[in-house]
Image: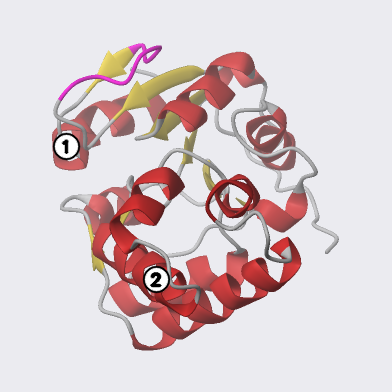
Amino acid sequence: MTRERVQSDFGKYVLFDVDGTLIDATDNQRRVWKTWAGRYGLDPDAVHELALRTRPMETFAEVAPDRDPQECLAVLHELEDEDVRSGVYGAFDGASELLSALPPGCWGLVTSNYEHRVRGRFARTGLPVPGVVVDAAAVDEGKPSPVPYLLAAGRLGAEPEDCLVVEDAPSGVESGRRAGMTVWGVNTPGGVDGVHRHFTSLREAVPDILAFVAGG
């Protein structure tokens, strides 16, 4: 899908991960993987634990090496799409206030998920969707490669050094760091290795994120 570059007069920009950062999808992901594992007669807890650390194709290779990975992926996508339609989602405390306060053109989303699911979850939680969304379909190399965050910066018309990345996962932190951006971690009890600053919650980070964008 072709995207036009968003032009902005802002000097600072912020790029958000989605799941685990803005949207609390932990229970949803657990249910999806449990259902997926049941389809193949696998231990749901073991599958989910592995899926937290690996990308889907790597998970399939480990837990179902005798299965067609494309078939496994198609089943997973079917379950995830159904969960977007019928699952219960919640935005993290502070997400609505933060995104509503950010001027259009100075922020975007960088996700390993797909844009239609992000839009569905945002619609369910009432969060605004920015003009720039870089999803799994937009790049050949996902996180921890720097490519997704560099693409988002380019679409915003921003230099990497002027971008703040807000993440909750090691692969996303590494992606932002390799892109040459400032990286803050949220929603984890302890700081993720590599972050420049750590906040135990998104709510705690809201004033500082707004100050960053304002040039403070």
Mark 1 crowd level (few <14, some 14–19, many ≥20, 10 Å Cα): some
Q: Is residue 195 magenta?
A: yes
Q: Is residue 124 above or below residue 46?
A: below
Q: Position of residue 10 (x, y in %)?
A: 55, 32
Quarter residue 176 falls in: top right
Q: Where residue 174 sits: x, y (%)?
A: 52, 21
Say the numbered circle drawn on residue 8.
none
Q: How is the image coloured?
A: secondary structure
Name the image quarter holding the C terminus: top left
**Front-most of 154 and 54?**
54
Residue 83 visible (yes or no): yes
Q: Secondary structure at mark 2?
A: helix
| Corner quadrant of residue 153 | top right
Residue at image point 63% right, 33% down: 149
Amino acid carrying label 1: it is Ser
| Residue 201: assigned label | 1
- Main SS of residues in magenta: loop
Residue at the outermost right position: 2
**Residue at image x 80%, y 55%?**
4
**Residue 19 visible from this viewpoint:** no
Say if the magenta span includes residue 216.
Answer: no
CA neighbours of label 2 inside 10 A, class few (<14), some (14 to 19), many (20+): many
Instruction: Looking at the picture, tell me which residue is in the foreground, 139 or 75.
Output: 75
Where in the figure is residue 85, as x and y percent of width and height?
42, 87
x then y, percent, for residue 193: 35, 14
Tell me the number on the disc at residue 32: 2
Q: Earlier in the sequence, mark 1 or mark 2?
A: 2
The part of the chain drawn in magenta is 190-196
Judge whether 45 appears above or below 15 on screen: below
